[in-house]
Amino acid sequence: MSSLTSDLSLTENITTIIRPPYFYISGFTAIPHMKYYYVFLCFVYIMSLIGNTFVMFVISMDRSLHSPKYIAVFNLALTDVCETTALVPKLLDMFLFGRQFISYDQCLANYFFVVIFLFMQSFNLIILSYDRLVAICQPLRYHMLVSHRSMFQLTGAAWVFAVLIVLFPVSFITRLSFCESVVINSYFCDHYPLYSLAAPCSDVLPNRVLSHLIPCIVFYIPMIFIIASYICITHALFTITLPQDRAIKTCTSHLILVAIYYLPINITYLFVFFIPSNIRIINLSLTSVLPPMLNPIIYVLKTEEFKVSAKKLIRRGAQRYVNVLKSY
């Protein structure tokens, strides 16, 4: 009798986790006239690849750009390429071939890679704002505070932190049971739509807490730092003798990137429980694809030293091509 009682209590303590073999990503199917949006995504993806690859190529080839600032710019371009590649090809595959089913493990991998690069966008903006802050407010100490070593340490720490912070929601998703719907109402395996599916069958409170805590760490705290840094920069521009036109031009480009990135995210995460799901999907997807396309145009290609280096490389490449033709 005691043996039977112990077996029953043991059975009651065993938690069965139900993991479906696949999920169905609804994507933009519920939104009318979305075929035009897929064409737009394809255009954005191609432009992002061309622009950011060109930026990385120029920085790699021109030794005059091997400075701490351009380590951060190279990291930004690399993140942009990775982010769009992690997201857009799957969206186009869903649209062109109707492959909206994704396995459980692939879904977690999809979430991990899309979100880690989205987070790195935020961290890159912090690094760039730190570079501008030191360059304008502490110009005499710039080379001491912003060296190659310190910039590599900052970017490396950002990558490590992004990986670690994304592992938390991934690990909490693995403890959930999905006993009802497998339809993810988003354009990728996003955290909130994913854990919402498990709400009838599991305790999703830890996931709900993470869905509020992580945006504060990754988005709001960096945004506060950037705002504070630009308050200091604005004060410095009015009190210190600097080449103000160049400084204002660089800061304006950076602030445009900050606005393009943070405003849609703030709308999405502050009002996640109030805005319609279709609006949330479109808003967040634009946040994921537009900054990678606009970063090379707004920030890098408007920088005079980068334009000089790019023209020099293009001229050199054209001359080599002409020489090859002459040799034939």
Image (cartoon, rainbow, N blue to C red):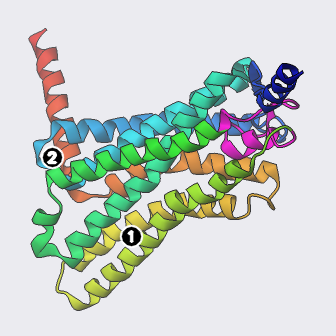
In reply to whether residue 110 is colored magenta, the answer given is: no
Picture residue at 27% right of the left edge, 58% below the top: 303
Picture residue at 11% right of the left edge, 63% below the top: 143
* Placement of the C terminus among the 4 image quadrants: top left
Tell me: residue 51, above or below residue 274. above
Tell me: residue 99, above or below residue 222. above
Q: Which residue is mark 2?
A: 66
Circle 1 crowding by C-alpha within 10 Å: few under 14, some 14–19, many from 20: some
Q: Position of residue 318 (x, y in %)?
A: 19, 30
Query: What amino acid does circle 1 point to?
Result: Thr
**Disc 2 versus disc 1: distance between alpha carbons?**
23 Å
Picture residue at 45% right of the left edge, 64% below the top: 222
Front residue of this view, candidates 140 and 55: 140
Front residue of this view, candidates 35 and 19: 19
Residue 252: image tag = 1
**Mark 2 or 1, which is nearer the eye?**
2
Query: What amino acid does circle 2 point to?
Result: His
Q: Residue furthest front?
A: 1
Q: Position of residue 227 (x, y in %)?
A: 44, 75
Q: Which residues are magenta?
A: 173-200
First in sequence: mark 2 or mark 1?
A: 2
